[in-house]
Amino acid sequence: MKKSILSTLFVFFLIIGNITAQVTGETKGWPSDERYAFINECINTAKEHLSEDSARFYCYCMQFKVEKKYPTIELAATITEADMNSPEWQKDIQGCLNGGTWTAADRSTFLNECITSAKGSVGDEKAKIYCECMLYKVEVKFPNPEDAGTLTAEKLATPEWKKIIQSCLDF
């Protein structure tokens, strides 16, 4: 029940944020298609060793870390295997591998409810991208999925959550 309310709140802010994004036209960092291509390629590779669910969490985590360190796709293209084997990157990689705490069922419930609610406003593909991004961000903020149910419309209207929601809209 709490997760249903939560996904409905995210969809409400998705609609408001989407209207704002259309008006301002602001997008920072990698182009959306590059972000999603990175994640899709990462998931396809990671699924050789992880479940699809864990691979998705890992790849969203890594995409955010890579984009933070390499703010343009051109800079990211310069990453070498030696870079990825550095102690700094290995720490980030392990953090992403060990970061997810929700069960596959929790993630699936959140995604299904969010996508079902959002697709009427933004279409199937954008709803999937937005909801996968929000799932990652919410799971990081709330390692216990029951705690995510404490989010209210008021909390989601704070600058911190508006920024999180907008980052997923920009995906």
Image (spheres, rainbow, N blue to C red):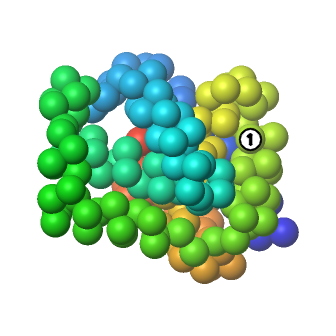
- Residue bearing the label numbered 1: 115
- Above or below, 56 against 67 in this view is below
In percent of width and height, residue 150 lies at 63, 75
- Above or below, 105 against 142 in this view is above
Q: Is residue 45 left or right of residue 159?
A: right
Residue found at the far right of this picture: 1
In percent of width and height, residue 28 lies at 28, 31
Assess disc 1: are there few (<14), some (14-19) or many (≥20) residues with their C-alpha within 10 Å of its C-alpha: many
Q: Secondary structure at mark 1?
A: helix
* Count of numbered circles in the view: 1
Q: Is residue 60 left or right of residue 128?
A: left
- Above or below, 80 against 59 in this view is above
Residue in the image at 27% along x and 45% along y:
66
In percent of width and height, residue 6 lies at 69, 61
Q: Is residue 138 left or right of residue 6?
A: left
In percent of width and height, residue 35 lies at 41, 32
Q: In the rendered image, is residue 56 in sight?
A: no
Q: In the rendered image, is residue 37 in sight?
A: yes
What amino acid is labelled 1 in the image? Ile
Residue in the image at 64% along x and 71% along y:
102
Q: Where the N terminus falls, by quadrant? A: bottom right
Which of the two residues, 27 or 101, is positioned nearer the viewer here? 101
Which of the two residues, 40 or 27, is positioned nearer the viewer here? 40
Q: Where is residue 158, by image quadrant?
A: bottom left
Q: Where is residue 97, by image quadrant?
A: bottom left
Residue in the image at 56% along x and 39% along y:
44
Which of the two residues, 83 or 150, is positioned nearer the viewer here? 83
